[in-house]
Amino acid sequence: MKHVLVLGAGLVARPLVRYLLDQPEYHVTVASRTVSKAEALVGDHPRGKAVAFDITRDREALSSLVAEADLAVSLLPYIYHVQVAEQCVRHRKPLVTTSYVSDGMRALDGAAREAGVILLNEIGLDPGIDHMAAMRVIHRVHDAGGEVKSFRSYCGGLPAPDANDNPLGYKFSWSPRGVVLAGRNDARYLENGHIVEIPNARLFATHYVTWVEGLGDFEAYPNRDSLSYIERYTIPETDTMYRGTLRNLGWCDVMQKLNELGYFSLDERPDLPGKTFQQVMAELIGEEDVVNLKTDLAAFLNLSPNSGVMMALEWLGLLEDAPVSDKTTLLDILADQMLLRMPYREGERDMVVLVHEFTAAYPDRRERITSTLIDFGIPGGDTAMARTVGLPAAIGARLVLEGKINLTGVHIPVLPEIYEPVLGELEQLGIACVEKTDVKRET
């Protein structure tokens, strides 16, 4: 009997826990600060166990939980992964996470190798399936004697078309804070051999429209620093490296104006609680009264009062004579209002879209290769986001436990021995990257 420890019982945990419990020789312990969430995940399964655990309070309990397990999966917030990894190295137990490798995690590579265990990170959707789908194509091109001259990647978790019914084209089943925080990032990418640097103030203004087969047009804007992926994906020959975020039409213009207004600010404002949205907006645009607020706001933003952005800001409630939340930063007030106005309703589906676009050059031809993943949530069941994040991690955990991934140290899923079996099993579960190739012969 293999004993798997799952730390965290959040939104992506259910498909992962269910997959592990479906393995006949696995016992699964789910440890969560909110033990009722862990109990809901394991139910009355004879090989499932729920325990109360708060990583911020009990280091000794973490050590004991890891020591009793054969493998740990951390679905905790990423800031706690290094703590978990240190205990895994100490007790010589492998670890799986879906989060980006931090500097602290990377620093454990040598110790993990010495302990003979793998710390497998970035094995969710983005990061995760994006790496695996990219490397499957890149390795195939290289093995056939080709070069990857251009790589563009787009990923987004969105409301399905039948649930896309608000002016921002987006909905939340979790706190919007992380999505808004991401809007504060700068971005860098490589375009036709030139490095393009986008400051935070212009992030959403740089969006462009891209077409996804079977779904239509979406907005894409750059996602942090794409340049590091040239080395990660072993394509030093590329002239273009762009990793972007996908959103439905209308999102970027609204977010750009919210940024310009100051709604992405994390400056402490103890005066905010007790104010109304009208009052806050008037202050942001330098007006003393709210009598002509809509007209004044449109003029401040250089927009028509009847523009789509103005309609979205009104719909969001940012011009209403209603109290803001009790938070003390503009960003948190915005996040609270988004969660209030933009939730998924009962029975609505989400959707995950991941698109890779490659240009591959060979001595006698050029190929344009696309790899497209589209997955829909199940009304009343798992979301597409939960499936596409949780299942790759669950499959990775099983492959490690069965010795089919026999690596040590800190890894992400860019090696064939990881991505081939994971992608293969995901396809059996209905999560497939569909590839298409257009060939142009050299004359």
Image (tube, rainbow, N blue to C red):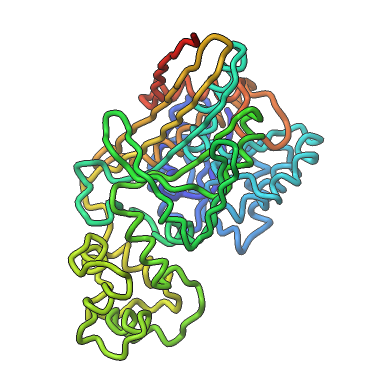
Viewer can see residue 46: yes
Residue 262 vs residue 272, the one in the foreground: 262
Residue 234 shows in the view: no
Quarter of the rendering occupied by the N terminus: top right
Whether residue 20 sits left or right of residue 303 in the image: it is right
Point 32% across, 42% down: residue: 218
The spot of residue 37 in percent (x, y) is 41, 52
Say which residue appears at 24% left-offset and 81% top-offset.
293
- x, y percent for residue 258: 37, 67
Furthest toward the front, the residue is 443
Res 231 quadrant in image = top right
Q: Compared with residue 276, is residue 92 higher up or lower down, i.e. above or below?
A: above
Which residue is at the front of the view, 103 or 304? 304
For the residue pair 61 and 11, the one nearer the viewer reads as 11
187 displayed left or right of 383:
right
Q: Is residue 404 above or below residue 234?
A: above
User: Looking at the picture, does residue 316 appear above or below residue 172?
Assistant: below
Image quadrant assignment for residue 364: top right
Indicate the position of residue 321 as horizontal and vertical percent values.
Answer: 22, 81
* Quadrant in the picture for residue 419: top right
Count the marks: how many? 0
Residue at the image point whose x is 21% and y is 46% from the top: 163
